């Protein structure tokens, strides 16, 4: 009884909270009432990004954000929405090696999944964005993505009466501003929490157990992978050069492109492994078709570099893994699939 | 009661402002024109494609021949300093009114007219190469004119992933086999988020002493500024050898985006902010 109650609370991570809502009435008698959604931190998840506290999800903010997330009018030719690359059934990533924008333009990197964003301190492969609200403008204006501008987008949204109404419900009046677009998109994304995989249910002692193979995989994972894929996000959110095949695009420099530090050259953020089975291909530009390819590569040996991660250096530039160990790790990684999140 | 007091204070301030304005009408504000000459040493730059014979060639301190096909940079945060040291800002927080893109391919862009400059004798000119961090957000709503100028297809002075402007954009060719060179500068500053700020600031403040004071008043003076791009590779701070490739040390094409390599060009172009406050810029003359 106790565990099923807890479970349903977990499922409804966001429920309506009756206090702390904004209420006001305008002269047309429209009563502005937008409830802040209650938020429950999943067990042992890392701390929230500070930006979350300044833009907590609200009932209508999230409704608007979801609608905008699926709106192709964000792209210059009205063909691509956020959801085109951030596909819910693939943990809000896609199956392309590199992101594909309007007119089949090819981007620089692999589309990252959108999940558990509220708990991240850095966004994107190189961590160039620190607050989720600052992210939406990037794909909107990037030539290889949506190739539009925020005022062009607003001009199109203003033609749709429903949006006027949605903005009014979310923000109190029907004005469509860049800030409101960014905030509602971020609010929606904050609600995309994946914390109900088999792994979570086992961890929370909700009655499920790992199979023998999964338990063995978890044991090996903890030995060989968990130094970087740490915490309940399965990423320690650090930036590392793990000697993967290098993106030959001259725009690519990894984290060094942001920080200007030579030590950050071709360092990338350790990706979360939650829902990893849904997000092939893998690597910053989709170098690997399958997870087994990734494990094979680590086993065979990675590219050397001056700033290669010390953990790899100390191990002869590889993570030695037997075929049996690889299979066990892959079985364990399947337990990080959150079918409820994927919508299956 | 308190409200009444506030009203009174406000009215007094307004009166004071009006009074000031009246005083100013006594002296004449006028234009001040900035003219930019982009050169290699003393030679004005002529742009050209890889094999264009007409393009101005330059040779770096390390012996690399090079020429440009494209040359653009952003000016903002312009201030004039009076003889007594007082600074007169020129729309420093309004990119639409106080910032511009200098584009060697557009002769008109080489002249930038500051209008309604208060009458005075000015001894010094200060400006920013690039856009200071607080305004460098690609805010189309706030500064649509500058946003459109910088973002135009033939300008491309936006740095999308950094959600900021490109401060310098140079395309060209180097060495006898005309390998492409592509040097883009811009800031990647993000934050503060909590106590954390990241990224590099490629914005540079330029301070130039005027050869003779610019007398704004009855007449509209013109200040001619030389931007010597010889110093891009052979600068006061760094002597740079271009190389093409995909390692972190290669710098000729925009893996320049490794902000590591970029900063060497930034310090040559706009000074290192410590003992070089002028970079490639100098005042060649003041016409009163």
Image (spheres, coloured by chain):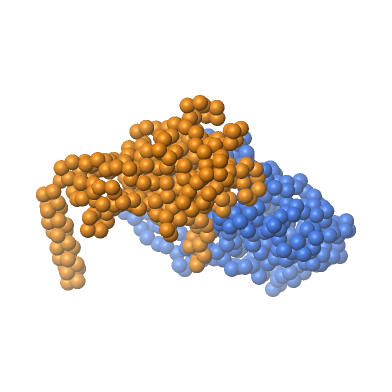
Chain colours: A blue, B orange
Q: Is residue B152 visible?
A: no
Q: Please identify the quarter of the rendering in which residue A329 is found.
A: bottom right
- Front-most of residues A21 and A74: A74
Q: Is residue B181 above or below residue A168?
A: above
Q: Is residue A152 above or below residue A335?
A: above
Apparent side of residue A91 relative to residue B31 in the rendered image (left or right)? right
Percent across and percent down for residue A88 are 64, 49
Q: Is residue A2 above or below residue B128?
A: below
For image coordinates 80% across by 50% down, the residue present is A293
Q: Quadrant of the N terminus of chain A?
A: bottom right
- Front-most of residues A49 and B168: B168
For image coordinates 24% across by 51% down, the residue present is B122
Apparent side of residue A189 relative to residue A216 in the rendered image (left or right)? left
For image coordinates 45% across by 42% down, the residue present is B229
Percent across and percent down for residue B150 are 43, 40
Percent across and percent down for residue B261 are 56, 50
């Amino acid at each position: 009884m106790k565990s099923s109650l807890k479970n349903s609370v977990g499922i409804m991570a966001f429920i309506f909270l009756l206090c702390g809502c904004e209420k006001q009435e305008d002269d047309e008698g429209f009563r502005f009432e937008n409830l802040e959604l209650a938020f429950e931190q999943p067990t042992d998840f890392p701390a929230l990004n500070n930006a979350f506290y300044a833009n907590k999800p609200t009932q209508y903010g999230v409704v608007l954000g979801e609608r905008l997330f699926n709106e192709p009018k964000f792209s210059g030719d009205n063909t691509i929405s956020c959801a085109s690359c951030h596909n819910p059934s693939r943990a809000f990533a896609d199956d392309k090696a590199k992101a594909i924008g309007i007119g089949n333009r090819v981007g620089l990197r692999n589309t990252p999944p959108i999940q558990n964003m509220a708990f991240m301190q850095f966004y994107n492969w190189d961590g160039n964005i620190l607050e989720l609200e600052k992210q939406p403008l990037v794909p909107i204006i990037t030539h290889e993505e949506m190739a539009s501008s925020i005022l062009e987008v607003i001009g199109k949204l203003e033609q749709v009466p429903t949006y006027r109404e949605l903005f009014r419900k979310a923000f109190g009046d029907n004005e469509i501003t860049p800030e409101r677009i960014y905030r509602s998109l971020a609010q929606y994304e904050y609600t995309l929490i994946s914390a109900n995989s088999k792994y979570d249910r086992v961890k929370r002692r909700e009655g499920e157990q790992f199979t023998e193979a999964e338990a063995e995989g978890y044991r090996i994972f903890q030995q060989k992978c968990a130094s970087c894929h740490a915490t309940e996000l399965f990423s320690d959110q650090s930036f590392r050069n793990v000697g993967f095949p290098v993106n030959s695009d001259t725009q690519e420099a990894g984290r060094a492109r942001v920080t200007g530090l030579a030590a950050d050259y071709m360092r990338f953020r350790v990706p979360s492994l939650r829902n990893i089975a849904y997000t092939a291909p893998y690597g910053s530009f989709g170098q690997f078709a399958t997870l087994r390819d990734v494990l094979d590569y680590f086993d065979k040996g990675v590219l050397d570099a001056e700033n290669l991660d010390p953990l790899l250096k100390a191990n002869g530039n590889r993570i030695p893994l037997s075929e049996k160990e690889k299979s066990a790790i892959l079985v364990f990684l399947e337990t990080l699939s959150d079918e409820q999140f994927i919508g299956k | 009661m308190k409200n009444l007091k506030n009203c009174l204070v406000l009215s007094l301030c307004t009166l004071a402002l009006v009074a000031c304005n009246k005083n100013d009408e006594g002296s004449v504000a006028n234009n001040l024109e900035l003219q930019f000459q982009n050169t290699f040493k003393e030679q004005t730059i002529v742009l050209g494609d890889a094999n264009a014979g007409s393009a101005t060639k330059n040779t770096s301190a390390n012996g690399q021949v090079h020429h440009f096909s494209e040359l653009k940079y952003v000016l903002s945060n312009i201030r004039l300093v009076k003889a007594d040291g007082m600074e007169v800002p020129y729309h420093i927080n309004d990119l639409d009114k106080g910032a511009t893109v200098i584009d060697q391919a557009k002769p008109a862009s080489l002249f930038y007219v500051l209008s309604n400059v208060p009458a005075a004798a000015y001894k010094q000119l200060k400006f920013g190469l690039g856009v200071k961090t607080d305004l460098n957000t690609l805010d189309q709503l706030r500064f649509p004119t500058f946003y459109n100028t910088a973002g135009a297809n033939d300008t491309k002075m936006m740095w999308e992933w950094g959600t900021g402007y490109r401060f310098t954009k140079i395309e060209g060719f180097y060495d006898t086999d005309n390998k492409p060179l592509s040097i883009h500068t811009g800031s990647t500053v993000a934050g503060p988020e909590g106590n954390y700020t990241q990224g590099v600031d490629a914005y540079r403040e330029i301070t130039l002493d005027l050869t003779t004071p610019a007398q704004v008043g009855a007449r509209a003076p013109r200040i001619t500024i030389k931007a010597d791009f010889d110093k891009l590779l052979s600068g006061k701070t760094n002597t740079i050898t271009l190389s093409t490739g995909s390692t972190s040390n290669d710098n000729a094409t925009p893996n320049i985006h490794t902000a590591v390599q970029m900063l060497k060009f930034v310090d040559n172009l706009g000074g290192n902010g410590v003992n070089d406050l002028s970079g490639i810029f100098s005042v060649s003359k003041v016409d009163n």
